[in-house]
Amino acid sequence: MSHGKDDRKDARDIILKESDISGLEGLEKIEGPWFDKACSLDDVVSHYYAIGFQATHLGKAIKIWKKVEREREKVTVFLAYTSNIISSGLREIIAWLVKEKKVDVIVTTAGGVEEDFIKCLKPFLLGWWNADGKWLREKGINRIGNIFVPNDRYVEFEKHMMRLFEMHDELTPSEFCRELGKYIDEHFDGKVKERSVLYWAYKNNVPIYCPALTDGSIGDMLYFYQKMGGKLKLDISPDIVKLNDHAVDAEKTACIVLGGSLPKHAIINANLFREGTDYAIYITTAIPWDGSLSGAPPEEAISWGKVGKHADYVEIYGDATIIFPILVWAVMKG
C-alpha cells in the first residue's frame, strides 16, 4: 500500500501541531550564564531563575527572600530546621543569620539544640558514607551521614547539662534553650561561642522553640537525672502560646523551612492562626507521595490555611547543604 503526499502532510500535522502562544507573552527565555562574562558567583547565581528546573526554584527563593529583606521591619521571619542541619556546617550560616538579626523565631528538634552546644565543646568530624557500623560502634563513634561524632562529646555534654539541670526547678523548652545560650556566654570564649546559634539567639533575644526537646541526648540525660532524684520539670504548654502569638501579632510573616518534620509544621501551623504566612521558602528532599508533612508542598498548606491564599512561595527539591549557602549568599551578600 502506497502513501501519498496527503498522508505525509497529515502525519506532519500530528507531530508538529500548530503552536498557539497566546498567554505566553512576557515569559522569560531559558538562558544560563555565559562564562566569558561571568566574573563571580553573583554573576552565575543571577542567572539561576532563567536556567530552568530546580535552579529556577532557587532563583525564585532568592527573589522572595530579597523581598522579605526589603520589608524587614514589617515581616516576622520564622526559621525551621531539623537536627541534621546543625550536624552539618550549615550551623555557622544559621548562627550568622541570627547574629545579623535576619531571623525572629526559630523552631528545631532536640538535636538542633544539643548539637549546637556540643560543638562548643568539641567539633564533629568529616567521615565517610560507607563506614562499617559495627566498627564504629566498637570505637564509640556515632555516624550522621558522613559526619562522625565520638561519644566523648556526649560525655562532656552531660557534665554541663547536669549543672544546668540543678540550677532550675521548672522551665519551658524555650526557656531551657535561652539558658543554654546564657551558659555558653558565661562559660566559653569568644571564638567558640560566636559560631553558636544558641549564643546569638540569647544575645539577640531570638526565641528557640523545641517542642520535642526530650527526643535526643537531652532526654537521655533527663532520664538519668530524674532516676537520681532530680526535680527539673519541662513544661511545654506556655511555649505553644508564645509561638502562636508571634504569628498572630505579626504584620506579615515569612517561613523558611530546611527539611520537614515537626519544626516545619510548628511554624506553618502557628501561621494558621493568622490565615497563613505571607512568604514561604521550603528546601526539602522529601516527596509528597506518602502524604507526610515533610514532603507536603506549599499548595497543601494553603488548603489548611497555613500558607496564605495570596502568599509568595516556592519549594526547592534538593540538599539544603548545597542550596542554603547559595541562597543566603545571594540574598545577604549578592
Image (cartoon, helix red, strand yellow):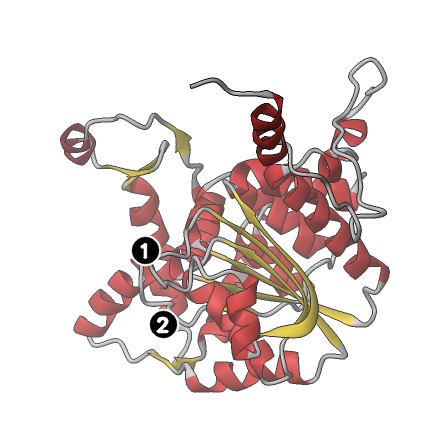
Question: Is 67 left, or right, of 88 in this rendering?
Answer: right
User: How many numbered marks appear?
Assistant: 2
128 over 222 or under it: above or below: above
Q: Residue at x 80, y 45 (%)?
A: 27
Residue 96 percent across, percent down from the top left = 67, 48
Q: Quadrant of the N terminus?
A: top left
Please indicate, yes or no, whether residue 198 appears anywhere in the rendered image.
Answer: yes
Report the residue that reaches farthest toward the front: 1
Q: CA distance from mark 2 to mark 1?
A: 12 Å
Q: Which mark is in front, 2 or 1? A: 1
Report helix, strand or loop for mark 2: helix
Residue 101 percent across, percent down from the top left = 73, 59
Pick the residue in front: 159 or 288: 288
Give the class, few, some or many, for how many residues have Cα within 10 Å of label 1's Cα (few <14, many ≥20).
Answer: some
The circle drawn on residue 158 is 1
**Mark 2 and 1 residues: CB-CB less than 8 Å, in contact?**
no
Q: Earlier in the sequence, mark 2 or mark 1?
A: 1
Q: Which of the 4 image quarters holds residue 106?
A: bottom right
Q: Which of the 4 image quarters holds residue 132?
A: top left
Q: Residue at x 49, y 72 (%)?
A: 266
Q: Residue at x 63, y 33 (%)?
A: 13
302 over 186 or under it: above or below: below
Give the residue pinned by disc 2: 166
